[in-house]
């Protein structure tokens, strides 16, 4: 846990239920909402943290003792997924309650049954207006202008399926930075 030597919370740390938490601690968190499990798995592989080998963990324990320093995420993100809009919305609420909000969310437009992507985004942004959002969809029955009007923001990003992996990674990096800046500025 982060904090000062006298036990007081350090900068960026705020109390939350169950202990101290920080919005900037660890890798940036993203939420992916898509009803297709195969798409969710692709996103985990493309954007997730790289797995560390157990031999490296053992070496660190030898060098640093039982509690080695935490390793960098090697550019990966901590990824949560939801297969329906209402589930994604509940995860946004829970992340805010924990004091560990998502940096950004990738949301599919068509997710039968239940909320579609647009309704999901509207609810998410009502709860967390600082959340960056990208719409990831093969097609949409609604124009970008109509989405911007209904959501109240014209800065939503769009990624068309099928997507180029490097374009997806770059979009994730961009939205992650924008999301971090939006959270710091308010």
Image: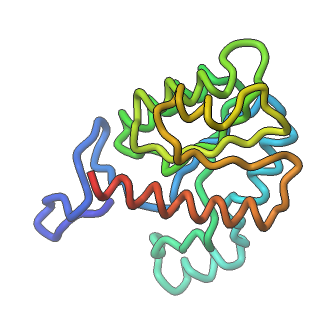
Residue under the point 63% across and 76% down: 58
Along the line of sight, the residue nearer the viewer: 67 or 111? 111
Q: Does residue 67 appear left or right of residue 148 in this picture?
A: left
Residue under the point 53% across and 48% down: 155
Q: Position of residue 7 (x, y in %)?
A: 15, 61
In the rendered image, the residue lying farthest to the front is 145
Q: Position of residue 171 (x, y in %)?
A: 66, 60
Residue under the point 59% across and 25% down: 120
Q: Position of residue 54 (x, y in %)?
A: 71, 71
Quadrant placement of the N terminus: bottom left
Q: How is the image coloured?
A: rainbow
**Up/down of 1 relative to 61, above or below:** above
Q: Quadrant of residue 138?
A: top right
Q: Does residue 173 appear left or right of residue 84 in this picture?
A: left
Q: How many marks?
A: 0
Q: Does residue 54 appear left or right of residue 24 in this picture?
A: right
Q: Does residue 176 appear left or right of residue 94 in this picture?
A: right
In the rendered image, the residue lying farthest to the top is 113
Q: Quadrant of residue 4?
A: bottom left
Residue under the point 63% across and 59% down: 172
In the rendered image, the residue lying farthest to the bottom is 63
Q: Position of residue 144 (x, y in %)?
A: 66, 37
């Amino acid at each position: 846990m982060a904090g000062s030597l006298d036990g007081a919370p350090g900068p960026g740390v705020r109390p939350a239920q169950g202990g101290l938490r920080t919005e900037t601690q660890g890798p940036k968190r993203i939420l992916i909402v898509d009803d297709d499990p195969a798409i969710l798995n692709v996103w985990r592989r493309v954007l997730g943290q790289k797995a560390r080998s157990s031999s490296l963990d053992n070496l660190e324990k030898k060098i640093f003792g039982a509690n080695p320093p935490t390793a960098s995420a090697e550019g990966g993100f901590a990824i949560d997924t939801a297969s329906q809009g209402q589930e994604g919305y509940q995860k946004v609420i829970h992340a805010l309650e924990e004091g560990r909000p998502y940096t950004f969310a990738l949301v599919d437009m068509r997710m039968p049954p239940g909320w579609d992507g647009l309704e999901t985004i509207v609810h998410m942004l009502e709860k967390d207006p600082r959340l960056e959002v990208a719409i990831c969809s093969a097609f949409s029955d609604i124009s970008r202008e109509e989405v911007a009007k209904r959501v109240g923001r014209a800065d939503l990003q769009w990624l068309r399926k099928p997507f180029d992996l490097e374009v997806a990674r770059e979009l994730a990096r961009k939205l992650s930075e924008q999301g971090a800046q939006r959270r710091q500025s308010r």
